């Protein structure tokens, strides 16, 4: 969801009224999966989404996802920009806290990378996601059952054997 007017020259214009109409239509048709990102329209997307969810009182009915990675505070002179981009733990925390605030919610259902930034190690990244799930304020972490671990191990083994990314195998498995 890339609603907002902050970057209308780049992405086109979408007023708050139009965004709410689109969200009303989606929800009215039974849709409840909404994906956004911390950087979309300089944060307007998450702000408007939070306003819409509060006006509808439907947070528990929505599957809210957001992602991070994109440096989006370059216009804020005087801030150390390294803290506001990439996949590092500091930006993960800053981005997630900003998403909570902008979306006016105390939990995000799915939080993921917008793009891979190869300077962050996989262990650091996974530590951050694990920490995030253990401290997700609005919901309790659900540990992966043993079956999910086994499926993940098989998908990783297949992906290595075929020389592709695990996600490519996982998507084929799900679809």
Image: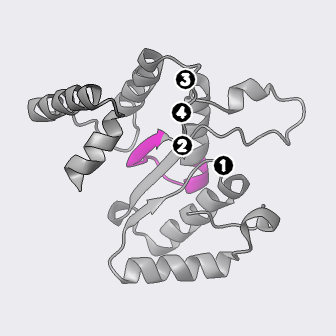
Among the two numbered marks 3 and 4 on one chain, the one whose residue lies closer to the N terminus: 3
The residue beneath circle 3 is 89
- Most extreme residue toward the right is 77
At a point 70% along the width and 26% down the height, the residue shown is: 83
Q: Are marks 2 and 3 in contact (CB under 8 Å)?
A: no
Q: In this view, does 2 lie above or below 65?
A: below
The residue beneath circle 1 is 39
Instruction: Give residue 37's position: percent from left, percent from top.
Output: 57, 51
The N terminus lies in which quarter of the figure? bottom right
Q: Does the magenta stretch include residue 94?
A: no
The residue beneath circle 4 is 116
Indicate the secondary structure of the residue bearing disc 2.
loop
Q: What stretch is highlighted in magenta?
A: 101-112
Q: How far apart are marks 1 and 4 (CA)?
A: 15 Å
Instruction: Give residue 131's position: percent from left, percent from top.
Output: 40, 24
Q: Distance between the residues labelled 2 and 3?
A: 14 Å
Neighbours of disc 3 within 10 Å: few (<14), some (14-19), many (20+): some
Q: Do the residues labelled 1 and 2 touch (CB within 8 Å)?
A: yes
Indicate the secondary structure of the residue bearing disc 1.
loop
At a point 55% along the width and 23% down the height, the residue shown is: 89
Among the two numbered marks 2 and 3 on one chain, the one whose residue lies closer to the N terminus: 3
Neighbours of disc 1 within 10 Å: few (<14), some (14-19), many (20+): many
Among the two numbered marks 1 and 2 on one chain, the one whose residue lies closer to the N terminus: 1
Q: Are marks 4 and 2 in contact (CB under 8 Å)?
A: no
| Nearer the observer, 45 or 101 | 45
Q: Nearer the viewer, mark 1 or mark 2?
A: 2
Instruction: Give residue 32's position: percent from left, percent from top.
Output: 37, 68
The residue beneath circle 2 is 114
């Amino acid at each position: 969801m890339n609603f907002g007017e902050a970057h209308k020259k780049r992405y086109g214009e979408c007023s708050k009224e139009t965004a709410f109409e689109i969200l009303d239509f989606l929800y009215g048709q039974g849709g409840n999966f909404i994906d956004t990102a911390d950087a979309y329209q300089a944060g307007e997307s998450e702000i408007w989404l939070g306003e819409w969810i509060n006006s509808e009182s439907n947070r528990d009915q929505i599957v809210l996802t957001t992602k991070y990675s994109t440096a989006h505070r370059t216009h804020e002179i005087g801030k150390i920009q390294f803290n506001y981009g990439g996949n590092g733990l500091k930006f993960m925390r800053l981005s997630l806290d900003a998403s909570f605030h902008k979306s006016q919610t105390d939990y995000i259902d799915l939080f993921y990378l917008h793009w891979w930034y190869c300077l962050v190690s996989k262990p650091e990244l996974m530590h951050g996601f694990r920490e995030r799930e253990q401290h997700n304020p609005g919901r309790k972490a659900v540990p992966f059952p043993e079956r999910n671990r086994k499926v993940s191990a098989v998908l990783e083994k297949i992906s290595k054997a075929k020389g592709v990314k695990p996600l490519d195998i996982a998507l084929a498995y799900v679809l």
